Amino acid sequence: MERIYMDNAATTRVTEPVMAAMQPYFCEVFGNPMSIHGFGREARKAVENARRQVADALKADPSEIYFTGCGTESDNWAVRGTAYAQIRKGKHLITSAIEHHAIIHTCAQLEKEGFEVTYLPVDEFGVVDLVALEKAIRPDTTLISIMSANNEVGTIQPIEEIGRIAKAHNVLFHTDAVQAIGSVEFDVKKMNIDMLSMSGHKFHAPKGVGALYIRKGVRPQRLIHGGEQERGQRAGTENVASIIGLGKAIEIATANIPRHNAEVSAVRDRLIDRILREIPYTRLNGHRTQRLPGNCNISFEFIEGESMLLGLDLKGIAASTGSACASGSLDPSHVLLAMGLPHEIAHGSLRLSLCEENTLEQADKVVDALIEVVNRLRSLSPLYDDFIAAQKANKA
Ligand code: PLP
């Protein structure tokens, strides 16, 4: 049985060129980059090369890039670090209702510590309300943190406009770009982005390595104390091999974004078009055009997302219902609820997330499998039976 992986928003595989770039940094170039001898200097040189690769991808300066342990750490550093560093200016932060838990739970913790947070609403497509954003800004607002693209429904936010608003009001702007790297072209200066989070495992680098861009002059308080790594701002011996992997992976991921987007969205659109056409009582979640090229999120009425996942898994297909970090929770997605979906429809949602390795043939196989799974599950659903019976009665 061919196994098909369509859960690239949860994580991606490490590709061969990335693995090859990392390989020497386990057994051969194993020095500690903080050591002053040759072994250390060699490792340091490679880390600094990776820093330049990340900076180039964002049109930033290498001195503005800090390596971290993951996207979650980058998000925590930007949000908590800014909240603490700017406490004299105020204790108010603005974010959106559809952020990843790395932001939402961090903000909730800050609220417990006496900070105030405004969670901006989104429209039915998951786009943040910019009028509400401008209205929410107060003299004591220290940070606006809005994700570049949503991990569940793939909606891309108007980042440049948010940057303009933040700048006009002299408020710092952080964006969680964990899902957007490789699909959205970033120019942090032009877009007025003060801080930007990323995570290697979303673009074919290993898990457990991330980065935070911090514009020169911005100083979120450091969260991890210890040694003087990362110019004294983030302690802990560098994860050298993974950092090299992240550098190589971002170079590949950002080399030709328009071509990547065209290729991946062709497969995505095959999925979306066929599912909506061939499976009744389905709806696309998220924006039709302002969406990540690899995201297909669809609600299926009368069935549970988890049952669909299990049915697909039996056929060798990996998908998800939403955020992998929230799986295990029986609550419907906070993202879909914020977009106004009723609970029962939010429960029946499926996310298929693609990378450039997925093909049109795979898309067709997945839709064929999905038709079987959905038909079987609906045939077992009393709700669906009642609905069909009521429809027949109405027609009669
Ligand atoms: N932010 C977003 C939008 C994500 O999708 C994720 C991971 O799914 C994270 C943050 C957390 O990144 P990491 O898994 O590297 O901690």
Image (spheres, rainbow, N blue to C red):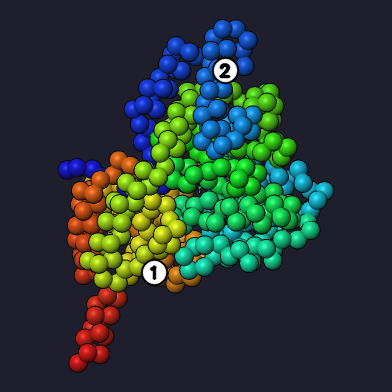
Q: Residues within 10 Å of mark 1 (few under 14, many from 20)?
A: many
Q: CA distance from mark 1 to mark 2?
A: 51 Å
Say which residue appears at 60% left-offset and 45% top-offset: 190
Q: How many marks?
A: 2
Q: Amino acid at mark 1?
A: Ile
Residue 40 versus residue 152 in the image, above or below: above
Q: Is mark 2 within 8 Å of ligand 1?
A: no
Relative horizontal placement of residue 21, taking residue 96 as reference (left or right): left
Say which residue appears at 30% left-offset and 60% top-offset: 272
The answer to whether residue 30 shows anywhere in this view is yes
Quadrant assignment for the N terminus: top left
Name the residue that disc number 1 marks.
345
Along the line of sight, the residue nearer the viewer: 375 or 292: 292
Along the line of sight, the residue nearer the viewer: 184 or 36: 184
Along the line of sight, the residue nearer the viewer: 197 or 194: 194
Say which residue appears at 68% left-offset and 23% top-offset: 228
Mark 1 falls on what kind of element?
helix
Q: Position of residue 74 (x, y in %)?
A: 59, 40
Relative horizontal placement of residue 182, taking residue 137 as reference (left or right): left
Name the residue that disc number 2 marks.
44
